[in-house]
Image (spheres, rainbow, N blue to C red):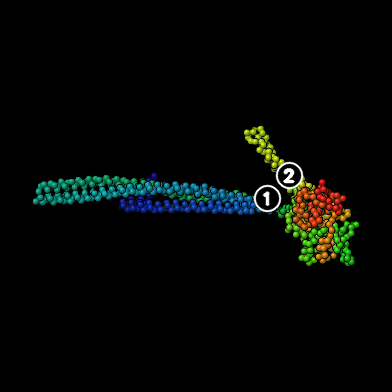
Amino acid sequence: MVSLPHPYVLHAAVSAPCLCCRKGKDQFDNLEKHTQWGIDVLEKYIKFVKERTEIELSYAKQLRNLSKKYQPKKNSKEEEEYRYTSTRAFLATLNEMNDYAGQHEVISENMTSLITGELTRYVQELKQERKSHFHDGRKAQQHIETCWKQLEASKRRFERDCKEADRAQQYFEKMDADINVTKADVEKARQQAQLRHQMAEDSKAEYSSTLQKFNSEQHEHYYTHIPNIFQKIQEMEERRIVRIGESMKTFAEVDRQVIPIIGKCLDEITKAAEAVDHKNDSQMVIEAFKSGFEPPGDIDFEDFTQPMKRTVSESSLSNSRGDGKSEPKFGSKSKGKLWPFIKKNKIIETLLGTKLSLKLINLNTQVWSLIEGAGPEDFSNLPPEQRRKKLQQKVDELNRDIQKEMDQRDALTKMKDVYIKNPQMGDAASVDHRLAELGQNIEKLRLEVQKFEGWLAEVEGRLPARTEQSRRQSGVYEAQNPSGVNSCAQDRESSPDGSYTEEQSQETEMKVPATDFDDEFDDEEPLPTIGTCKALYTFEGQNEGTISVAEGEMLYVIEEDKGDGWTRIRRNEDEEGYVPTSYVEVYLDKNAKDVHKPLQKISE
């Protein structure tokens, strides 16, 4: 309760009563407009914060989608690339951006709960309070106006009665002075004047009472009721102003609270960037792609001043025939070795317009083969070091699969034991089928492990024992595909002492027209069989010079493995080629030469 009236009330108190009421109504209208404007400002700020939260959510969603888009896919080639420090730093950046997006979601959530939600409830309360205050103000205004109307009515009635009393008194005096008027008329006029005077006195008393009452009500209205209402409206408006200021402060605090966490995210990105090690990445590339081969030796000078016959140095890429074996000429019938890549080599020679050495032709042939098909199961298309790594990875993967299957089998075994001890929990026989499946899976995986471990032992046993001669033959031009291995097997021929030779010497002897060269191989006789073999696994011979075999198939052996991992076999007179030695089981038979025995009888 305030002791002093509102300023505009003081101004109104010295004016006429009707003017006071009119000004009081005007002030209520002005205050009503101002408070409504304040509520509109508050709602506008709420809308602003809502849109800010939507922007934060949208930004966080876009950041998460961006991070997810560039995350490496599981079990893909991209996942392998993230072993380098630079790519790991990028992965760390993606993860930190995901956390960064989370902080923007926190901003949105806090603004929604601390600002939008609170202000929305406050606006509803503010509207109800404002409505109540202005209702009280209008009620007080109506009451004072009603009192004013009563006062005006009492005043008019008192004025009318006074005028009537004056006229009655004048009429009485006139009648009393007139000698022609009877005494009865004079008495009647006198009584009427007295009656009018009494009515005027009554009206006067009523007017005086009404006036006192109105003055009291008016004083109470302008000095008590209206100031109280205005004070409440003022306090309401001030609370609104304070509340919107606090909300703006909270708006800033919500952002400030996440700054340390965002700073940590940025620090982690910086830390990951500083951890990038170019030397380490380079070393990893070297370890990943080193072949294990040694560079080929120097090529010796070939003296073309000699008439027709040239000797190729032993250290060159093309090795001469072994001692004790005559060197076949290009025009002779070759009965010991077919060159399955001759037609592709002719295409390469035609395109290049010059005669290339066999090693360069082999390189181009391997590029052809790389386009034609995928690598074999034993990774024999890869260089030794790469093959060893792939085989080791395969063995580790199979061992992990075996461990998983064994864990499942152990868990099912324990479950079966529980069912046996507590039959009400389940049927023990229901897990037998699954246990049998797991046992079969484990056995299959163990066989696979043995197979790959055999290949791995073969590779690890060969790597340190290679001679300078074999390293030179399998140099950097051996391509990483099945045809690279096949070409090496097909281009080699064993000499009496077991060393490898290549038919490069035939290629470099002389240049013969392509048609004559084709006729050489079209007319040659088939090699004699030296035994039989049984295919242990299915082999898809997709490259030139190889032959496809099915598991369990019996075939003839026409040339045994000379140490290069390939065995030459024949299915019939028209189908022959090379298969990996590890894919077949060979039965050598000295009596089988030059004779084609039925394969069924031989296998028996």
Which residue is denoted by mark 2 in the rendering?
Answer: 444
**Mark 2 element type:** helix
Q: Where residue 548 sits: x, y (%)?
A: 76, 53
Q: Where residue 490 sits: x, y (%)?
A: 81, 56
Q: Which amino acid does label 1 sit on?
A: Asn
* CA–CA distance in space, label 2 to label 1: 23 Å
Q: Is residue 314 left or right of residue 265?
A: right
**Mark 1 element type:** loop
Between circles 2 and 1, the one closer to the viewer is 2
Looking at the picture, tell me which residue is in the foreground, 529 or 228.
Answer: 529
Residue at 27% over, 45% down? 209
Q: Can the viewer see residue 407?
A: no
Whichever of callouts 2 and 1 sits on the residue coming sooner in the sequence is: 1
Which residue is denoted by mark 1 in the rendering?
Answer: 75
Q: Where residue 306 sits: x, y (%)?
A: 89, 66
Looking at the picture, tell me which residue is in the foreground, 175 or 431.
Answer: 431
